Image (cartoon, helix red, strand yellow):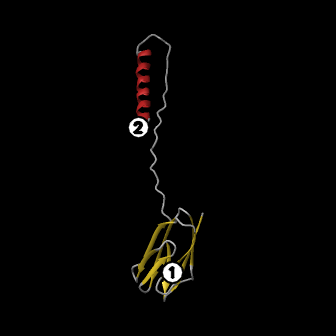
């Protein structure tokens, strides 16, 4: 039974109780017995389903052909989403080894990656042309 149906049933029960009470104790009656019935009406507010928030996007910045701050380490569990983007000051092809995913990056146009970690192990993400590693991706069971 939905909340709306439950509320309607409670309201109907309260109305019936009032009508029955009216006929049991009639106005002007000499009967001194008073019967009272109380019914509580409970109103519930339906909850809004929540949507899970996506994992944060990790940003790797590449300047002069090198990752700013060194090689970034990303650790996830198998089945998790891997989300990151690479911002470059020059045109670069970014390649995720093992998953064989590549995206192009250029100034003002970052490479965006969003995939499910289906393979376990340690994987390099690199600037393809120079073979410079920018991310160490570890996927554990």
Query: Would you place residue 55 above or below residue 111 in this image?
Result: above
Residue furthest out toward the right: 141
Which residue is pictured at 41% across the width and 23% down the height?
A: 16
Q: Residue at x 50, y 14 (%)?
A: 33
- The quarter of the displayed image where residue 25 is located: top left
Q: Nearer the viewer, residue 120 or 67?
A: 120
Q: Which residue is mark 1?
A: 126
Cα–Cα gap, marks 2 and 1: 57 Å
Question: Of tags 2 and 1, which is closer to the observer?
Answer: 1
- Identify the mark at residue 77; answer none if there is no mark: none
Name the one closer to the observer, 137 or 13: 137
In the rendered image, residue 6, in percent from the top left (x then y), is placed at 44, 34
Q: Residue at x 42, y 86 (%)?
A: 90
Residues packed near mark 2 inside 10 Å, few (<14), some (14 to 19) or many (20 plus) = few
Observer-nearest of 101 and 13: 101
Which residue is at a point 49% across and 23% down the rendered structure image? 37
Q: Is residue 42 above or below residue 130?
A: above
Q: Quadrant of the C terminus?
A: bottom right
**Quarter holding the N terminus?**
top left
Helix, strand or loop at mark 1: strand
Residue 128 visible here: yes
Q: Residue 107's spot in the image, x, y percent?
A: 40, 83
Closer to the N terminus: mark 2 or mark 1? 2
* Vertical arrangement, residue 53 with respect to residue 88, above or below: above
> Mark 2 = which residue?
4
């Amino acid at each position: 039974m939905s909340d709306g149906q439950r509320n309607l049933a409670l309201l109907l029960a309260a109305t019936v109780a009032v009508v029955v009470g009216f006929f049991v104790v009639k106005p002007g009656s000499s009967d001194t017995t008073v019967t009272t019935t109380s019914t509580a009406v409970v109103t519930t507010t339906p909850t809004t389903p929540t949507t899970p928030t996506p994992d944060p996007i990790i940003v790797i910045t590449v300047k002069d052909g090198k990752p700013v701050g060194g090689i970034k380490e990303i650790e996830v569990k198998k089945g998790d989403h891997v989300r990151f983007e690479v911002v470059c000051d020059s045109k670069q092809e970014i390649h995720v080894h093992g998953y064989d995913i590549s995206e192009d990056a250029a100034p003002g146009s970052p490479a965006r990656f969003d995939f499910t970690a289906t393979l376990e192990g340690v994987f390099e993400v690199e600037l393809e042309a120079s073979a410079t590693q920018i991310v160490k991706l570890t996927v554990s069971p």
